[in-house]
Amino acid sequence: MEPRSTGYGWTIRLSPMNPDVFAGIVVALARVTVMGERLLDGDVEGHVRRSIDDFAGAFARHEALEPAVERMRGSILMLHGSRRAGRRRAYEHDKILIGELDRTIEERLLPELRKIGFGV
């Protein structure tokens, strides 16, 4: 594939691959997206959903994924912090979901990205 500008001043080149190598990423991203949509409404939750959308857009446009992954991870950390400092009821509602979201990113999405050479 031809190199593409990422908007961050970096260019990435994806070698010709069987499209099946991306299947694991697509499945993990779909799971992360669904979990993000199930979060309660709020500023931090909206930030999580936007960071997931940003990652999906960067992936679709073949842009550098590392900055998008960092934003997504950072938004999850913010969500953990807001839940600990916020209303107990909201924390209890989302505690399991937030844990699942975090695990899906760390144990499914990131390993799939590493398989094809991303340093995340």
Image (cartoon, grey):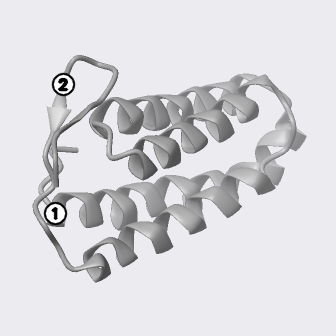
Residue 82 relative to residue 113: left or right: right
Q: Is residue 28 above or below residue 41?
A: below
Query: In terms of depth relative to the viewer, which is nearer, 9 or 40?
Result: 9
Amino acid tagged 2: Trp
Q: Give me the residue at 83% from left, 52% from top.
A: 93
Q: Give me the residue at 34% from left, 21% from top.
A: 7
What distance separates the C-alpha of mark 1 from that of mark 2? 18 Å
Q: Give me the residue at 58% from left, 68% from top.
A: 31
Q: Which mark is residue 19?
A: none
Q: Is residue 94 above or below residue 72?
A: below
**Image quarter of residue 45:** top right
**Residue bearing mark 1:** 116
Query: In terms of depth relative to the viewer, which is nearer, 1 or 42?
Result: 1
Q: Residues within 10 Å of mark 2 (few under 14, many from 20)?
A: few
- Percent x, y for residue 19? 30, 77
Q: Secondary structure at mark 2?
A: loop
- Percent x, y for residue 106? 36, 56
Residue sticking out furthest to the top: 9
**Image quarter of residue 49:** top right
**Residue bearing mark 2:** 10
Amino acid tagged 1: Ile
Instruction: Quarter of the image for the N terminus: give it.
Output: bottom left
Numbered disc in front, either 1 or 2: 2
Q: Earlier in the sequence, mark 1 or mark 2?
A: 2
